[in-house]
Image (spheres, helix red, strand yellow):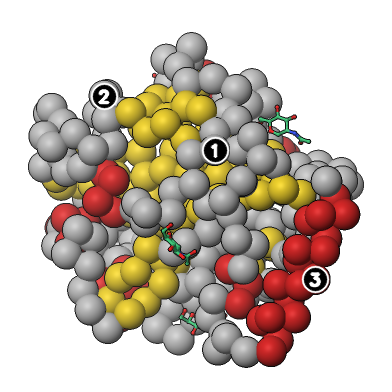
Amino acid sequence: MVWTAALLVVVISYADSDDYCYNEPHCDPYAWGDMFPSCHPLLEEHHSPINLDQHMVRNSSLDSLHLEGFDAAQPAGHWTLQNDGHSVVLHMGSGMSVSGGGLPDVYHTVQLHFHWGAQATNGSEHTVDTRRYPMEMHIVNVKAVYPNLTAALDDPTGLAVLSFFIDVVYADNVHFGHITQKLSSVALKGQTTKIKPFPLISLLPKHNMSQYYRYYGSLTTPPCSQVVVWTLYEVPIHISWSQLAQFTSQIFSTEEDAEQVTPLQNNFRHVHETFSRVVSASKDAKLLSGTAARPLGSAATLMLIITVGRVSSAL
Ligand SMILES: *[C@@H]1O[C@H](CO)[C@@H](O)[C@H](O)[C@H]1NC(C)=O
Ligand SMILES: *[C@@H]1O[C@H](CO)[C@@H](O)[C@H](O)[C@H]1NC(C)=O
Ligand SMILES: *[C@@H]1O[C@H](CO)[C@@H](O)[C@H](O)[C@H]1NC(C)=O
Ligand SMILES: *[C@@H]1O[C@H](CO)[C@@H](O)[C@H](O)[C@H]1NC(C)=O
């Protein structure tokens, strides 16, 4: 009996140590490298997320990406929303792909997921002038030559992730409701629910899709593979305070039979050095997102002058 209990403890702690987490010292992002060696942020390695500052280089050949199937009125089949214990993931069927905008190939869209904070903290992964937005959404795309995401992890440009900051306003975002209305069905780790496909473009800042930043980095979750061509859109998606609260307070990292229920909060990786990497700004990027959360005034004007000066001297 005692022996069985001891074995059970060993089995449970083994299962625990096999998984990563965000908020406990033994498995949080600073400890990921112990379990997943490729998460060690060694010198000159290309990890994500990063901080976006004014040191960007304009690349006028970076135009809007081509988003195939994103505006289809009725994409076929159904999508699956899942709580995987680390995020809420929307798995999408086939039929969508991204290309152009300087991407080296065509990439099939496979899923999107979110990173968030808590009631009183912001939780985007990338930061702008060291400030976090409340949330960040990642649309994950796999190079078309590979059958699945795992197969793309050995190619330095195997994945293309489109990232959108999410900011908060008073009004609900009706399109975002396609997802938030289903969150209560995936409150616990392991739960899934079906979602009727909707045009993904309706979630995105569709008038500002030519304004973005580009750099080469990694997955922000284990195994932290350095295989991601990042596209960070400048203009955020807006949702309401109550839609944000559905993520920060109604999603849990624990399973149904857990003794203790733990909210899934602050599921973002810490910011990494850019080292010698270049962050490019698209042709239409305004390079002003660092001032977005601040009142416009002389400081913003001064920053614009500095920015324009840097960009032109970089050209
Ligand atoms: C600009 O972007 C294009 C497409 O990604 C790339 O081929 C080119 O090398 C970039 N130019 C500079 C100066 O970085
Ligand atoms: C968090 O986000 C809100 C809404 O965008 C913003 O007003 C606030 O300044 C942010 N806080 C931090 C610490 O960046
Ligand atoms: C992914 O593709 C590889 C290569 O074709 C294959 O060996 C592997 O089983 C696939 N993995 C999954 C999870 O489907
Ligand atoms: C978004 O795009 C519109 C149309 O091009 C432009 O007028 C507006 O300034 C852009 N918004 C931001 C925040 O850059």
Q: What kind of element bears circle 3?
A: helix
Residue 28, compared with residue 67, is above or below; it is below
For ligand 4, give the image quadrant. Answer: bottom left
Residue 56, compared with residue 237, is above or below; it is above
* Apparent side of residue 166 relative to residue 53 in the rendered image (left or right): left
Amino acid type, mark 1: Asp
Q: Quadrant of residue 87?
A: bottom left
Q: Residue at x 57, y 28 (%)?
A: 103
**Marker disc for residue 95:** 2
Q: What kind of element bears circle 2?
A: loop
Check if mark 1's residue and mark 2's residue have beta carbons within 8 Å. no
Q: Nearer the viewer, residue 213 or 297?
A: 297
Q: Position of residue 34 (x, y in %)?
A: 71, 48
Label 1 neighbour load within 10 Å: few <14, some 14-19, many 20+: some
Check if mark 3's residue and mark 2's residue have beta carbons within 8 Å. no
Label 2 neighbour load within 10 Å: few <14, some 14-19, many 20+: some
Amino acid type, mark 3: Ile
**Marker disc for residue 63:** 1
* Cα distance in 3D space between marks 3 and 2: 43 Å
Q: Position of residue 22 (x, y in %)?
A: 54, 63
* Cα distance in 3D space between marks 1 and 2: 23 Å
* Cα distance in 3D space between marks 3 and 1: 24 Å
Sequence order check: which comes first, mark 3 or mark 1? 1
**Marker disc for residue 306:** 3
Whether residue 306 can be seen here: yes
Sequence order check: which comes first, mark 1 or mark 2? 1
